[in-house]
Structures are given as structure tokens and as C-alpha cells.
Image (spheres, rainbow, N blue to C red):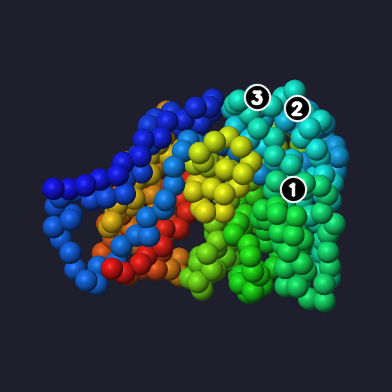
Amino acid sequence: MSTCSRLTLRPRHRGLLTAVVFLVACGSPEEESISFAADPVFDIPNWSGHWFKGNTHAHTTNSDGDSSPEYVAQWYKDHGYAFLVLTDHNVFTDPATLAHLVDEDFLLIPGEEVTSSFEDASVHVNGLNLPHVVEARQAETLVATIQANVDAIREVEGVPHINHPNFRWSFGAEELAQVENDRLLEIWNGHPTVHNDGGGGSPSLEEIWDILLTGGKTIFGIAVDDAHHFQGEFHPDRSNPGRGWVSVRADALDAVSLMESLEAGHFYASTGVELTEIAVLPRTLELHIAQDRDFKYETTFIGASGEVLLETGENPAIFQLSEDVGYVRARVRNSRSDYAWTQPIFITRR
């Protein structure tokens, strides 16, 4: 007889997923009857809770944004986000001053973009869920400078995420591979001067991610707005909101739960594609994509060294694990060139 643990997840907030989501942690009787000692299997995530849509990188007039903290927070609340981290450059924007905007459907998390440099390289590390301002640090090398700012955030029990490596072509996989105690990396940033796609021989942010994963680093990819411009025209050459976000699966809409889920990789990143179901079976990864108007979708399953393991236009998109590939992650693209990225699911052997 087959035994099965099935988790039903129901979104609770405006702008979030519109369908029931299942995480399946077992197989069918047929699957259970097949057992090979060398079969590779997924390291099935132990996740639970609801989906919460949020942005972890936005600026206000407290640094170089064009709108007040209240205006920025209200914009995200009005557009269906469940949480927001205000991350002004080397400024702590206290959410307590905006307590009237917080309710059961919207949370403000304290943060800062800890902004430093080494020679010509910009070193920007966001600190999430901080208790106060964190002073930016510099060190004797580029790697040491990145590490020093990650450490400064960890010292106050904040959560670091390293921002836009390709901004001013500041650093890449070689430097990031040497950084310790970091779990989050921007793989897509909505600012028009960030070179998400790489170029001229420099890898894209997504390629940097695969280099790190292939090298054995456990790190999860996030998409962000890095929004500065809330007033006037919304244009590709302006840093407007609403371009990149994360959908986090957490037990509650509180800072601790959200931070734990982010650092465990219990989320997906998006620039416009929504997923309605992610199912992880012993030898299968299955994605259901929310249909938006008449858009078409292509899902690419990617493994070590960025190898394309499967491309499919089917919905649901299903990857049958048939070889030891180290990890599997998925990228979904719609016909308007919006994306969603799932986090890597690592492979173990029985």
C-alpha cells in the first residue's frame, strides 16, 4: 500500500497565486515498486505554508529615490504585494514610522542597501530584517570587501543578499565563489544599468548563478526591482517598480518566517510569470504555469554547468529525472519575454 504526505497550500493575499498548490513528497505505487540502488533522487524540500509576493530592493527619498517611504510602501501595497523591504543606501528606514500601512495582508521589513566599493568595483549588499543601520565596510581586496559587508549584516542577525554583480561589471563568479555565509544572489535586477544578460564575453547573472551552483555553492536566485523612479513616466530607461519580485512560501506573514524561507530556497523569482503548482516527486519535478491571456510558455530545465536538460512547451512542464545531474532548476519564459525561475533542487543518491 502506498503512503503519501500531501500538503495543500492556499494563497491568502491579493496579487498572489490564484490556484491551489501541492507539494508532493511521495510517489505512486508504481513509482515505489521501482527501486534501483543507484537511482538519483531529488532532495525534496521540507516546505509548508502560503505564498507571499514581495520585493526586497527599493529606494526612497531617504537616499536616491524620487518618492517618500510612505509613497513607495503604498505603491507596493496597492499593487498586491504582501511584503516589502525598503533598502536605501546606507540609511535605515524604520518601518515603525509607517505602521499605519501595515495590516494582516501587508508587511514592511526593515532593511538597507549596505553600499561600499573596492577600487572601481561597486559592492552593494542588501541587509534584510535589520535592527538598525549597518555601517558599510572596506577591506584590502574585492573579495574581502564583499565578505566584510556580508559579515556586518550577519553580525546583527540580518539576512544578506548580494546585489547586481554586473552593475559596472563589478565582480563575477570567481569572487562570489570565495564569499561565505551568503545564500541569496540577484539573478535579475530591474535597474536599466544592470547588465542582466551579460555581454562582450562577460556571463549573464543567470550564468554566474550556474557557475556557482556547479562549483558546489548552495545559493538561491532572486529577482528585484531596485526601484528608484515612482513618479513620471514608466519607461525602460527609468528604474520603475513592478519589474522583478519573489514569491515566498512561508508559514506566516512575518519577518522571521519569510527570512527562513528565503534562506532555505522556498521561493521562486519572477518578472511576470506565475506558477500555480510546484510538485517534487522522487524522480520528477513538475511545474504548472498560470495561464495569462493567450500567452504561450516555454520551460527550460537546467542542470550543472548550465546544461539544458529539457525544453518543453507543455503545461504542466515535467522533468523526468533519469541521470545524476547534480541539480535541476527551471526557467519559464512566456511569449512576452517575462520569466520565472525556480530554485535548484539538488540531487542525492539512494
Disc 1 crowd rating (10 Å Cα; few below 14, some 14-19, many 20+) is many
Judging from the image, what secondary structure is the residue with disc 2 in?
helix
Judging from the image, what secondary structure is the residue with disc 3 in?
loop
* Residue most extreme to the bottom: 140
Q: In terms of depth relative to the viewer, which is nearer, 69 or 168?
A: 69
Tell me if residue 58 can be seen: no
Judging from the image, what secondary structure is the residue with disc 1 in?
loop
| x and y percentages locating residue 334 in the rendered image | 44, 42
**Nearer-N-terminus badge (1/3):** 3
| x and y percentages locating residue 189 in the rendered image | 64, 49
User: Could you tell me the amino acid type at mark 1?
Assistant: Leu
Which residue was labeled with disc 1?
130
The label number, if any, that marks residue 99 in the structure image: 2
| x and y percentages locating residue 301 in the rendered image | 38, 56
The label number, if any, that marks residue 302 in the structure image: none
Please give the name of the residue rendered at 73% of the width and 64% of the height, measured from the top-left corner.
151
| x and y percentages locating residue 314 in the rendered image | 30, 44
Quarter placement of the C terminus = bottom left
> Viewed as shown, does residue 224 lie left or right of 69?
left
Q: In terms of depth relative to the viewer, which is nearer, 313 or 325?
A: 325
- Residue 38 quadrant: bottom left
Disc 2 crowd rating (10 Å Cα; few below 14, some 14-19, many 20+) is few
3D distance between C-alphas at marks 1 and 3? 20 Å
Please give the name of the residue rendered at 23% of the width and 50% of the height, measured from the top-left corner.
27
The label number, if any, that marks residue 103 in the structure image: 3
- Residue 103 quadrant: top right
> Viewed as shown, does residue 168 lie left or right of 264?
right
Seen in the picture, residue 17 relative to 2 is either above or below; the reply is above
3D distance between C-alphas at marks 2 and 3? 8 Å
Tell me if residue 16 can be seen: yes
Please give the name of the residue rendered at 46% of the width and 50% of the height, measured from the top-left corner.
342
